Image: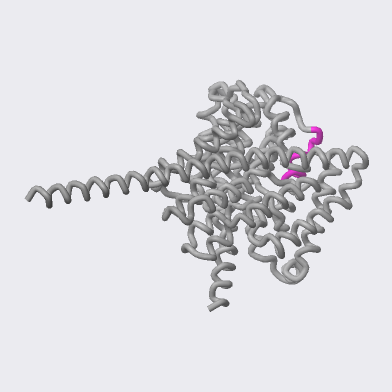
Amino acid sequence: MIRPMFSRYLSHIQNLARIGLRRWRRRIFFLIGGLMVGAAAVLMAKLADAAQEAFASALAISRYSALVVTPAGFGVAALLARHVFMNSQGSGIPQVIAARELPQGPMRTNLVSLKVAAGKIVLLMLGLLCGASVGREGPTVQVGAALMFAAGRRALDYHRGLLLAGAAAGIAAAFNTPLAGIVFGIEELSRSFESRTSGLVLASIIAAGLTSLALLGDYTYFGRTSDALPLGQAWLALPVCAVCGGFTGGLFSRILIFVSDGLPGRPGEFVKRHPIAFAMACGLGVACCGLASADSTYGTGYEQARNIVHGVGPTSEFFAPLKFLATLLSSACGIPGGLFAPSLAVGAGIAASLHALFQSIPLGALAVVCMVSYLTGVLQTPITSFVIVSEMTQDHALVIPLMIAALIADAVSRSVCREGLYHALARPFLKGTLRRSESHK
């Protein structure tokens, strides 16, 4: 009688030990993955800065060198993205969304493999080296998801959770905005709250953030600001900024989705048959935007946005529309590159244009509101937009105005573009992988 009871008790203890071991193993894998993502984000930040400095050095020798360097670089990047590093084109966030929707297997792995991650880094730097108007934050999401997926996919069964954790950690480490990483993971990538992996995702974000903190130190992306928007007449600028940002951002998304779905008629046939020539033509357009803007529309736009946030106007009065066009051309041609940083720069440029109407309001306050409005218009993620910009500036006095601007901009954007940008751009990856799967049957 005692022996069977003891055996059952011992078996129960062993089961509890196995469960505890599995839980700790999951936590360890997520922590290790977070450390890897943080290190990758720092590496990409350093390489991006070096690439932009190299391009600036070339422009210092001759501004018109961009007319050759930028189209050639776009052509090479598009060629490699199509034939060597497939599934590396564009932001990278649509690939992660598609990978989370696909079943486990080669179709998912092809979108977030280590080869794709390596190609993403190489081609992103090539794009910045030739003046593309792209950011590194979207690519960091795909690289982060790939690293996390590679670290734990053979040992853990939470594959969707791995992708979510890696992508969210990528956003957190890229901007040093841990709260935005959590919100972006819920609002855009998963669009639901997965309770069983929430703690693991948080652990990955913490690990990635600590890695970035250890390597780069404690910093605020745009530097701390203290501009305020006093309640009263100054708030009249809120709906104007929100409507302008939301409409322009929605227009950007609608055009980009339209181009990605395929242009109609002869232009569409030309793009399908000659994608490299189309990329080079887009590169030429980006170079022309750069020349027309006193070289201010190349690259991520971080310096220009930071200057406007701190009250220094852009070097060109046409900075906002030219940066908009340069970013659209860089994104439409399929070369790897993100939208976050260029979108923030466009939003800051809109604020500089509107400042003539609201001269009594500090330019920095207008810039922060317009950045949230335009980013919301592009992504249609209002919570992520105001959280990420709030963390970038640490301007707590503007939190309520930013919430209001994000809500208005989101409504305006959805009236222009009914489908979220990243989910629309994920469709070709889902269709392409499914077609390839059926062809192998």
Instruction: Judge whether 43 appears above or below 224 on screen.
Output: below
Q: Name the residue: 59% across, 25% down.
A: 234
Residue 121 on the magenta span: no
Residue 237 seen anywhere in this rendered image of the structure: no
Residue 268 in percent (x, y) is at 72, 68
Q: Which is nearer the eye, 275 or 383? A: 275
How many numbered marks appear?
0
Instruction: Judge whether 349 appears above or below 70 on screen.
Output: above
Residue 320 on the magenta span: yes
Q: Which is nearer the eye, 220 or 2? A: 2
Residue 317's image quarter? Answer: top right
Q: Name the residue: 57% across, 72% down.
A: 435
Residue 269 in percent (x, y) is at 74, 71
Residue 12 seen anywhere in this rendered image of the structure: yes
Q: Name the residue: 21% across, 47% down.
A: 10
Q: Magenta residues: mostly which secondary structure?
A: helix
Residue 235 in percent (x, y) is at 57, 27
Magenta residues, start to end: 315-324
Residue 277 in percent (x, y) is at 81, 63
Residue 281's image quarter? Answer: bottom right
Q: Name the residue: 57% across, 77% down.
A: 439
Residue 221's image quarter? Answer: top right
Q: Which is nearer the eye, 51 or 27? A: 27
Left or right placement of residue 15 versus residue 240 in this view: left
Instruction: Judge whether 174 appears above or below 426 on screen.
Output: above
